[in-house]
Amino acid sequence: MTTKAPTFTQPLQSVVALEGSAATFEAHISGFPVPEVNWYRDGQVLSAATLPGVQISFSDGRAKLVIPTVTEANSGRYTVQATNGSGQATSTAELLVTAGTAPPNFSQRLQSMTARQGSQVRLDVRVTGIPTPVVKFYRDGVEIQSSPDFQIIQEGDLYSLIIAEAYPEDSGTYSVNATNNVGRATSTAELLIQGEEEAVPAKKTKTIVSTAQISQTRQARIEKKTEAHFDARSLTSVEMVIEGAAAQQLPHKAPPRMIPRPTSKSPTPPVIAAKAQMARQQSPSPVRQSPSPVRHVRAPTPSPVR
């Protein structure tokens, strides 16, 4: 197995403790070969000799320092150092010993955000409280453990969750719970990670229609309207002629009185025949003329002489 320099998968977190209570520092460390761990306060090496009652342990990658009963003199900056043949790493946090108490409070809450796939995402909160609250991050109700992919770090009262490379499956509801022996506080926000196909919308295919096609389409529409118009007018005219001539009747109307057909063998249209018949009925009978144009006048008969 290749060697690997020490890395903090979970760094130290600062602690605010009540005077007379216990204070605990804990960090998770990875590396091969297994690193050697040392603790310092304000640059001075810590041990049972320099800090009576202190408990220091390192097992399964977990480095822990516990001060069972703290006093104001124990306040300061605590550092854990991990070293192996491939390198060295350190993590530092503060211990504040106080006589008062305060429930957890978010001076900066989680903020909902949207990020692109493959980008780094950082969710920050600021939490205060006495004693120092225990802060945990959750996604959809499941606690997030610090790891190379999901790093949880603390800098004073600033707590951060860093997603090294975000993917759409990392989307969800994220929350932070802060708890101490006085109370509890929660902050929640939504994280949306957009996939590549969402981040860059696909180009829509355009249908390009030429001017000639537009003209043909318009001409077809005009022709359809014209045909419909003439069909309507023709139907009206035919109905008017048929009703006036009483020659034909539509199927849904009562059949009219039939007009005798002309004796002539010439194919006279029914409409013309009907009009001619109507004209004969309406015009007066013609005056018969004598065969001769000369009119004969009779002389008066003379009366007999008495």
Image (cartoon, rainbow, N blue to C red):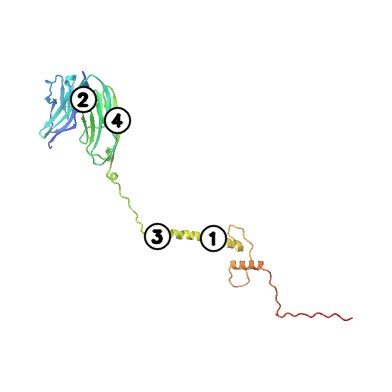
Tell which tag, 4 or 3, sits nearer the viewer: 3
Mark 2 and mark 4 residues within 8 Å of each other at the beta carbon: no
Helix, strand or loop for disc 4? strand
Q: Residues within 10 Å of mark 4 (few under 14, many from 20)?
A: some
Is 180 on the left-hand or right-hand side of 288?
Answer: left
Q: Quadrant of residue 166?
A: top left
Q: Residue beneath label 2, please?
A: 15
Image depth: mark 2 or mark 3 in front:
3
Quarter of image, res 263: bottom right
Q: Quadrant of the N terminus?
A: top left
> Reading the chain from its start, which is encountered first: label 4 or label 3?
4
Residue type indicated by callout 4: Ser
- From this viewpoint, which residue is outermost toward the bottom? 305
Crowd band around label 3 with a 10 angstrom C-alpha radius: few (<14), some (14–19), many (20+)? few
Residue furthest left as drawn: 85
Query: Observer-nearest residue: 142 or 91?
Result: 91
Which residue carries the number 3 mark?
215
At a point 22% along the width and 22% down the height, the residue shown is: 17
Instruction: State the image coordinates of residue 219 (x, y, percent, origin top left).
Output: 42, 60
Q: Which residue is labeled 1 in the image?
A: 235
Mark 4 → mark 3, Cα distance in angstroms = 63 Å
Q: Nearer the viewer, mark 1 or mark 3?
A: 3
Q: CA distance from mark 2 to mark 3?
A: 80 Å
Disc 1 vs disc 3: Cβ atoms closer than 8 Å? Answer: no
